[in-house]
Amino acid sequence: RSSRGAPRVGASGAPCVLHMNGSLAVNKHNLLEALRGALSADAAVRVPYEAALAAWEAAPGYATALLSVYESPPAGCGGAERLLAVLCLKAAVGRRWNERRSGEPAISDAEKAEVRARLLPATDEREPALASQLVLTAATIARLEGLAAWPALLPALTASCTRPAPLDAARGLSALYRVVKLQASRRLLAHRKAFFALSEQLHAPLASLRTSHARALLGRVQPLLGGPADQPIAGSGAGGEACALLAIKTERQLLLHGYARAHASQAALASVRDFVELAAAASSAELALRRALDACPLAPTAGAAAATADALLTADALLKVALVAAKSLVEVQEVQPLALASCVGRALAVAASELGSRPFSAGSADGSEKLLVRLTTLLRNVVCCASYAAAAPGAHRPHGRPPAPEAVACEVAVRSFVLSSGLASVVHSLVTRALPLGEAELLEYVDDPEAWVWEEAASREGASLRRCAERCVSSLAEQAAARAAVQAAVHAAANEAAAAGLASCEAVLRLDGCYAALAMVHGPAEADSLCAVVSALQTHCSAAPPDSAHLLRRRAASLLGHSLSAPELVRTSAHEQASIEGWYTLLGMLLQDPHPGVSLTAAIAIRRLIEASDAVPRTPPLDESCAPAAPPLRRLARVTLVPVLRLALSAREVQSRWRLIALAARLISRASPPRAAEAADEDDSACADRAAAVAGWLRAAWSASDGQQLLQEAVLDC
């Protein structure tokens, strides 16, 4: 660009550094001018300077010039210019460190050596924004060429991790974590072997650092609990909790990627054991601090305020440590399941204890709920792990090889937990504490039931303890060894909730959670049990207070959709199971419920049923003479078509209306018989009335689409 036309003029009036003949002058002064211009808010000024910086990447000396701007900024160079210089250096390293294509210029070997030498002390930068980018640049260089090409990096970082000041050690650990994480992402066989060797080298020092910093953090609890109320308590120093967190994260990378078989390493087994104990100790200490503060609030003095603030900060730090330790356990168990061989029973006990005792605010996304989500996930993964189940006596082994001793130990621990009262306690805690709607969720549902119902249908288990608990209860019930115990625990919780009465909204929500669990633990093969559940739910819907009965009716619609869409029931003609044929009628009644949350949930249940029937075609009856005039699903489509059309017109949100119109199109196709010979399965007048209703609705729906193409296309489909 610079070879044509007049030279550009910068924001300060000075000519741009791009020369008329196309040559590029890379020096500190010109580079600083370009960095300032690239920070301009005016696009006409900024774009030429950005192009100049991009073109300079191929010029010799560009990377070292950027380092010079960072290291010794000239007068008038602020923090923004220094940060942009570091960002440009990171981009240049990523694109020009190695030659990507033949003939494409790359950074020379001499300049690489200078960059490495000058970048090494820069990894100890104190300003956070600069430090994160400098460390990432160093880690990128180490990933591109390997640690062997930069032998001074690892010793310098490991030495910086052991500095006595916690903030200094935290900076070193942060740099080491970035380097280790990017080294773990190298996937070639030679790279994997190099990372295995790195894991052996770093594991013991990291475990020692993690132990010392975690012990220092836990050591702050007793003085805070027993110290004088009017005196601030000195902690282990700012940055101590950051050191513990970074050490755990770095150790997690080694466990996930640094061992072909982590269970064969005593260091790895010891680290996983320590994670379990650390999660338990940090959680217990955090709860003790918060309970002490709630039970004995300190006097409103300056010293007491400082002590309270220190206690709260310590409690928050302990919760973060417990969260990171729990996440590490979940990830290690997924990748290296046998690494938990020495602590499976202890991990299950810790998860069960936390699920039964830790207070949390459902739906508020606080740290306690997040911790319970991770522990619930860990418990489910451990109990349902195929690697453990394959070691059970009598299990099928395709290759005939005996199971590993670690797998046998894990299987024995899991079987012991399943056969003990621990499993029943866990299920009871999940059903009574995690499955009921929380206060925040209930307020959101009452405020906007339409948006809440659709979000509930699409939500996933990772963010909400309630959704995670649903998956956990369902998975536990699928295990043959645990099924009876899970069903008994759910029934006990449901009977307990029913016996407590339905006088309050909390009681209704508790019973609602129990019915959600009952639908999960009784499969389609247990049609009689499901019918009893539906019958009891109808009775409780009638007995609940009018202002909260809609919660149980919504649960009934969800339960019917969940049960009827099961492949076992979809695959079988419904008239062969007379006990469930009435469910279709009940679902149609719930679709016309006056509460929008109930009617929309019923519509979603019908959509789920139709989608399931499309994926799993029903088998024809053996004797056509005993088949009904119309299958139940076709009768359901005819009964529910007009209510769905009305519901689509009353929906407020565009996406909600579009989904309901798409459901109406599916119902129109399902309401018609597939062959002309079957046209006699419905009275002509009923068909004419439905056709007239659809015709009138089409005109109204087209007018209400307000020119929105999404809605117009859905109406045209109908």
Image (cartoon, helix red, strand yellow):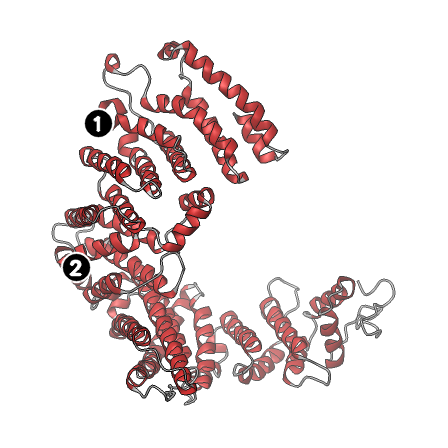
Relative depth, front residue between 477 and 56: 477
**Pointer 2 local density, CA inside 10 Å: few below 14, some 14–19, many at least 20:** some
- Residue at image point 72% right, 81% down: 28
The percent position of residue 319, horizontal first and vertical second, equals 35, 71
- Residue at image point 75% right, 71% down: 37
Relative to 647, is 378 on the left or the right? left
- Please say if 242 is above or below 664: below
Of labels 1 and 2, earlier in sequence is 2
Relative depth, front residue between 350 and 389: 350
Kind of residue sitting beneath label 2? Gly
- The quadrant where residue 465 appears: bottom left
**Disc 1, SS:** helix
The percent position of residue 704, horizontal first and vertical second, equals 59, 31
Foreground mark, 1 or 2, reads 1
Residue 579 got which mark? 1
- The quadrant where residue 262 appears: bottom left
Q: Quadrant of the N terminus?
A: bottom right
**Pointer 1 local density, CA inside 10 Å: few below 14, some 14–19, many at least 20:** few
Kind of residue sitting beneath label 1? Ser
Residue linked to disc 2: 422
- The quadrant where residue 103 appears: bottom right
- Please say if 343 is above or below 306: above
The percent position of residue 64, horizontal first and vertical second, equals 65, 79
The percent position of residue 240, horizontal first and vertical second, equals 40, 82
